Amino acid sequence: MIPSLSLECMCRMKIVYIFLHIVLFFVDMMERIPTTICPDNSTWNTQSTETSNCIYNAGWTGLSGDLFTVCGVGTYKPSTGSGVCSNCPINSISLSGSSSLTDCMCSAWWAGASDSLCTECSRGRYKTDVGSVSCILCPQGSEALVN
C-alpha cells in the first residue's frame, strides 16, 4: 500500500514544483539575452545564439566579432554585417559612413544623377559644387578654366 500524503504536503510540493519551473524559465531567458551591449553603429544579431555577436550597420565595415570602422570618403556599404565598402563610381564622392550608391555625388566639373556615371562638363560649361546639379553655361565672353 502506498502511504497517502496530506493535502498540505501535496500543496507544498506543488508550490515547489511551480517555483522550480519559474526559476528554470528565467534562467533559460537570461541565457538568451545578450550579456554585452553592442557598440555604437552595430546591432544585436537576433539569428545568433552567441552572446558576443553584434552585426555592423550599413556604412560600416569589418569582420564579424572584430573591430569595425566607418566606410571612408568615396565609399559606401548598403548591407549590414561584415563585408567591404564599395567604391563610388569614378568622378564621384561620398561622405564617410555612406550606406547607399545614391550617397555618391558627382565631383565638381562632373554632372549626373547621384546613382549613375558622372560625365564631364562640356566645353563652355562648369560646375563647382559636388552633387547631382547640372553644369552651368559660362557667361558670354568667358570660358571655363578646366575642361
Image (cartoon, rainbow, N blue to C red):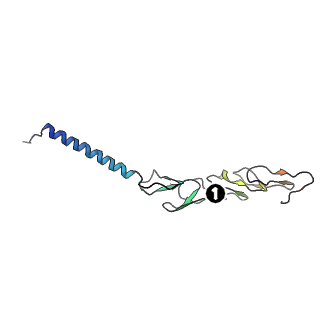
Residue furthest right as drawn: 141
Q: Could you tell me residue 126's position as x and y percent?
A: 82, 54
26 relative to 51 in the view: left or right: left
- Packing grade of label 1 (10 A; few <14, some 14-19, many >=20) is some
Q: Residue at x 84, y 55 (%)?
A: 122
**Quarter occupied by the C terminus:** bottom right
40 relative to 10 in the view: left or right: right
Q: Residue at x 22, y 41 (%)?
A: 15
Q: Could you tell me residue 84's position as x and y percent?
A: 58, 60
Q: Residue at x 44, y 57 (%)?
A: 52
Q: Could you tell me residue 111's position as x and y percent?
A: 77, 53
**Quarter occupied by the N terminus:** top left
Number of numbered discs visible in the structure rendering: 1
Dot 1: element:
loop
Residue 59 occupies which quadrant of the picture? bottom right
Q: Can you identify the residue that label 1 sits on?
A: 96
Residue furthest top as drawn: 7
Q: Residue at x 46, y 54 (%)?
A: 37
Residue furthest left as drawn: 1
Q: Amino acid at mark 1?
A: Ser
36 relative to 79 in the view: left or right: left
Q: Could you tell me residue 107's position as x and y percent?
A: 74, 56
